[in-house]
Image (spheres, rainbow, N blue to C red):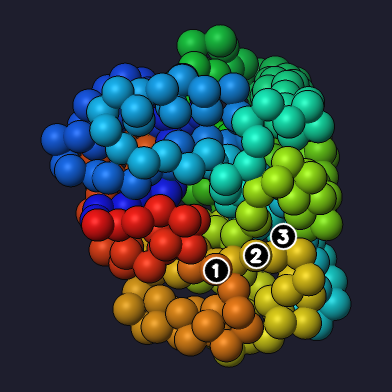
Amino acid sequence: MIIDLHIHSRDCSDGKMSLGDIFREAEKRNIQLISISDHDAVECQETAMGLAAEHGMHYISGVELNITFSHPAYREGKSISLDMLGYNYDIHNRALRKKTRELREYRAMRAKKILDNINEELLKEKKAPMTAEDVRAIEESVDGAFGRPHIANYMVKKGLVSTRQEAFDRYLVKCNVPKLPVSLEEASSLIHGAGGKLMLAHPNDPNGTSLVSLSEAIEDQLEIIRTAMLPHLDGIECFHSRLTRETTSAYLAFARQEGLMITGGSDCHQQPVIMGTVAVPDFVALQFGIDPK
């Protein structure tokens, strides 16, 4: 069975393909178990379920939530961002729908305020401010939840700064607007309250939102999960397009030792189209009561 439980759509998140195109492509790739796990969005789940049925696929409801997390033994207790995956929840749960709507609305407002602050600085320097066209260009570049790194990358591309670090040093630190924080405890309560399961997404992703921000050592990451996260987690995404064999092996052993569920997916945003390319074993389907035969 070909399984992919981590795909993003254009309809509700930052993917490049519509739900219809995703499911047509997934059928061509013979994906048999699928989940659309859009960032802070559950509104597309009913449509996704219908499309899965039309294309003869098994479907598990999904969502990716960004949380704020800290550990006293790392980075002097300063917080980092982590991503959590919620699966198999009630897509009509009012609390989850309300919170995800709030998160999206706040994220859009935050991005606008940060750009407004940057424009004030640019005007002080007698430089042309960024326009609505620039904002659209930044949004097109986003792979994940919209954040300051995307703005920094665009400022380099536009020639406003030479490096991403310069963008932060000169503009993004002073122009920052705080995130709307979601704790691990709150994410756990939301997903479990909707009858779902909560997974730590891409835990050792070197290029993304992961525990690498606290420590690059897998041993440290496992200890962080053991000491500060286990009561709130149901599982770990052990199979992912940016996890090495070493990482997958270590996390698989840890998950089995701690009695956690194991999930996996490509994290496909369709640039390029990599859905179905991560070898996720059949036992992942069995955990959700789906017979892979």
x and y percentages locating residue 13 in the rendered image: 51, 29
Left-right relation of 108 to 239: right
Residue linked to disc 3? 80
Residue to which mark 1 is pinned: 261
Q: Distance from label 1 to label 3 (Cα)?
A: 24 Å
Name the amino acid type tagged 3.
Ile
Whether pointer 1 and pointer 2 mark residues with C-beta atoms closer than 8 Å, the reply is: yes
Q: CA distance from mark 1 to mark 2?
A: 6 Å
Q: Which residue is mark 2?
A: 234
Q: Residue furthest left?
A: 28
* Amino acid type of the residue tagged 1 in the rendering: Met
Q: Nearer the viewer, residue 75 or 209?
A: 209
Q: Secondary structure at mark 2?
A: loop
The label nearer to you, 1 versus 3, is 1
Judge by depth and name the residue closer to the eye, 238 or 121.
238
Task: Name which quarter of the figure residue 243 lies in.
Answer: bottom left
